[in-house]
Image (cartoon, grey):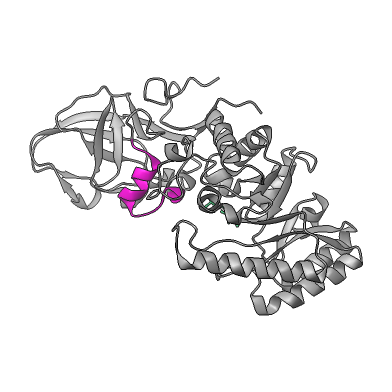
Amino acid sequence: MTTANTTGTAGLTQGARAEATIDLGALRDNLAALRDRTGGPELMAVVKADAYGHGAVRCAREAVAAGARWLGTATPEEALALRAAGIGPEQARVLCWLWTPGGPWREAVRAEVDISVSGRWALDELLAAVRETGVPARVHLKADTGLGRNGCQPHDWPDLVAAALRAQAEGLLRVVGIWSHFACADEPGHPSIQLQLDSFAAALEHAERAGVRPEVRHLANSPATLTLPQSHYDLVRPGLAMYGLSPVPEVGAPADFGLRPVMSLSARLALVKTVPGGHGISYGHHYTTSGPTTLGLVPVGYADGVPRHASNAGPVQIGGTWYTVAGRVAMDQFVVDLGGDAPEVGEEVLLFGSGEHGEPTAEDWGRACGTISYEIITRIGARVPRRYVGGLA
Ligand SMILES: *Cc1c(COP(=O)(O)O)cnc(C)c1O
């Protein structure tokens, strides 16, 4: 049952200093909106980095309840945590893609976690894990189609494909996926997009001619899921869009894509006081009151994930009015200049929410801090309790 956001505030739990409210109903609705928009392809709910700060296990369960049959994580540890929480292979395939030598590959193979391979070094280490465990691996071969980060370069691709097919013939693995990742999908029309589409088609054609029969071919992150149907293939991999934020803010706001932000962040006003004009505020005195005014103390800081770059810039809403961070964000707290207003100590300070009630959004915070909404939500720290509403799973 969702009771949050009916009054424009998330409704802080009694006694809470700060709280991130995670609206799991919004998460399910966002997945449904993505499915409506894309039609055919399967959805992989990307829940890396603790589901972008929203809580990986809770969000993964909810995504599975909403029909996602794939989950995506960066590290094998993140994938194993989902399996340890009881999300079995019959409920969801889990793919991890960030390879480091010495990783828990035996455990990943045993837990039937799908593993991305970008080169021979990874394949060889994975095959050693397979021989030790006796469990064949499910492998997604990753092509570097132009991102220049992870993935196999075109000149090494035939060799990697051939080596994987030899291991498949020996029963050591199955190549279940061919995939890649975009560099500039968030800039529709960027010339690299077509080049990557062409490069992916070529990598795929080579692999299929060599004998690979992938279950899934996949390329699309959130921006490509929303703006580039020709990239969808068999599976799309939305992260940010599932959390209800727009990966292409210059093209459209979340509502334009049928999305609703999942996370809102609130704190409780800790102190209100009057100060004279000319008073320096917070470390370094980077803000000075222009006249007699009131100040509010907000008990969250960069240890909670409020960026120090929000100093003199980040927006908050208290009782329907917007105020701006005054002076530096400290580790545990920051100050807002209330301009003579005197809200009650203990009132809710909304840092960001859905925006549906005029409050700031994670997108606003990203803009204020010179970063992207991805970083704002993902960095909300472990000291901030998550409160889940609207969950079914
Ligand atoms: C993070 C990530 C995604 C999801 O990206 P969004 O832009 O949040 O949708 C998809 N694929 C890979 C490989 C990723 O690393």
Q: Quadrant of residue 216?
A: bottom right
For residue 358, say whether it is visible.
yes
Q: As rendered, which of 223 and 139 lies closer to the eye?
A: 223
Q: Residue furthest bottom?
A: 155
Residue at left offset 84%, top offset 61%: 173
Our reading of the magenta stretch's main secondary structure is helix
Q: Is residue 359 above or below residue 185?
A: above
Q: Which residues are magenta?
A: 360-375
The x, y position of residue 255, in whole percent, is: 43, 36
Q: Quadrant of the C terminus?
A: top right
For residue 101, say whether it is visible.
no
The x, y position of residue 325, in whole percent, is: 26, 42
Residue at left offset 33%, top offset 40%: 333
The x, y position of residue 263, in whole percent, is: 47, 36
Q: Is residue 157 left or right of 110 when viewed as pictured?
A: left
Q: Is residue 277 left or right of 60 when viewed as pictured?
A: left
Q: As rendered, which of 92 and 80 lies closer to the eye?
A: 92
Residue at left offset 63%, top offset 62%: 180
Q: As rendered, which of 80 and 33 lies closer to the eye?
A: 33
Q: Is residue 322 left or right of 198 when viewed as pictured?
A: left
